[in-house]
Amino acid sequence: MNEQTKKNLDELYKELRIIRTYDHAVAIIDFDFETCAPVEGRGDEGDVISYFANKKFAISNSGKMKRTIGYLYGHIEELDELDRILIRKLNENLEKTAAVTAKTQLKWLKIYNQAYIDWLKAKEVGDFSLYKKSFCAVIKASKEKVALRKNALPDLYDNLLNDCEKGVLSATLDKFFDELKVGLMELIAKIKSSDHVIRRDFLSRKVPIYKQQEFSEYVLKLNGYDFKRGHISTTEHPFTNEIAKNDVRVTTHYFENMFLSNLYSVIHEGGHAILMQNEPEEDFEHFINDSVTNGMHESVSRFYENVIGRSKEYISLIYPEFHRLFNEELSDVTERELYEAVNIVEPSLIRTEADEVTYGLHIVIRYEMEKAISAGKISPAAAKKEWNRLYREYLGVTPKNDAEGILQDVHWTNDFGYFPSYALGNAYNAMYLKRISSEMDFKGAIARGDLAAVNDWMKKNVFAEANRLTPEKWLLKLTGRPLTAKDFLEYLNDKYSEIYGF
């Protein structure tokens, strides 16, 4: 590395440390914004978030940064592997934002923050009309954002998808979702034809929140979440936030009469957090620790939530503590009844409460709607009507109000493109499930409570290069095969044929 290159790299790292400080501040305020901020205080907090985020944007897109990144991109072969990854990422981001002014960026940030506030109010009363204005503003902001990009893809939605899952476009997803939809429909038909009845009367019993809180901490610790570097709080729509390297926070939402909702929310968000707490130290040192794509992330969270968390072995593992803690409310529930209950397959309205099988159809609906709205085939004003139509057609259910319909997810307070990541995550983890099962006694480790062995394998194989590779290359290196829905469908058929006896 010549002296000029070293000088530019040192200067870049100095600026990135400043940007990381702004990120840290924004993350803390945003966590407060979504968890404990009073209703009337959210507007002010949103303005503060926008202010600091815009300061970060100004530094990231300054002439100085552009020159530094431009120089390093031109001398990229002099850099080590991780710095090359960093420079390619920063250069790509600059190409997306080169024509964006700080004023325009601030306008967009305020739109997203206001959208979250309006969504909360609209969801509380179940009325989409109260959110429609913000929904239109979010979509308009997405269009403006893509229109200003230097090397934008021809299709609006492909740009948004690529932002969430690099290299994954609608042409690939169309084929993937077609295969997934057909396979899920066939499996659902088999399950419907089964005469096996799963006990469910206890699922709506009231379980005190303080007991659910204790159980939440138990399963998080059991799964490997480090509370010395983490915290759990509550929110309307659960999420995980990496505040800093040693501060990864999870959130949940407690319902007294839906104890399983919190349990699997916590396991899901804990999966995200376990990945974040186990990223390589070198990734933080080289500022690439936030490069894991949404699909990769969801593969991990849904691996812990479903593949591990809804397995027979895991239910057997947690059953003694479940029986001890909830003895007063659920003492008559056997281990097998609990296992079957957490795996009931039944079309429902709420995505986050959906079973493993029908869950994919919730994502298909959102994917088809995002594509159609992005292409102008459905107006934002008509989105509610289309949502309800697709739920009737694919799942045979109709929302009673918009809170259990189009307003149920927080995701549309920001750009489209995230939802397909959930389905991709299922496909990814079903593919690497085959590998982990061939290299270790996976089920035995869960049954023994040796989640440390599972986490160690995940750290070495799934997490190690997730920041460094595109989804396509990561999946090929991890499994030796390109994306397919086949493994996931096989996993579901094997599991549910045993439960439902077909």
Image (cartoon, rainbow, N blue to C red):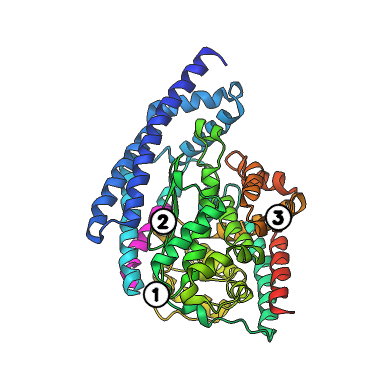
| Percent position of residue 158, x then y | 55, 53
The reply to whether callout 3 and callout 2 are in contact (CB within 8 Å) is: no
Read off the residue under disc 1: 402
Looking at the image, residue 94 lies above or below residue 375:
above
**Quadrant of residue 62 in the image?**
top left
Residue 159 in sight from this viewpoint: no
Q: Residues within 10 Å of mark 3 (few under 14, many from 20)?
A: many
Query: On the picture, is 128 further left or further right than 448?
Result: left
Residue situated in front as seen by the camera: 167 or 449: 449
Read off the residue under disc 2: 414
| Percent position of residue 238, x then y | 43, 60
* Lower sequence index among marks 3 and 2: 2
Looking at the image, residue 392 lies above or below residue 366:
below
| Percent position of residue 287, x then y | 49, 34
Given the image, on which type of amino acid does mark 2 rest? Asn
Query: On the picture, is 355 further left or further right than 186?
Result: left
Quadrant of the image containing the C terminus: bottom right
What range of the chain is rendered magenta?
129-143
Residue at 64% across, 45% down: 456
* Lower sequence index among marks 1 and 3: 1
Looking at the image, residue 219 lies above or below residue 153:
below
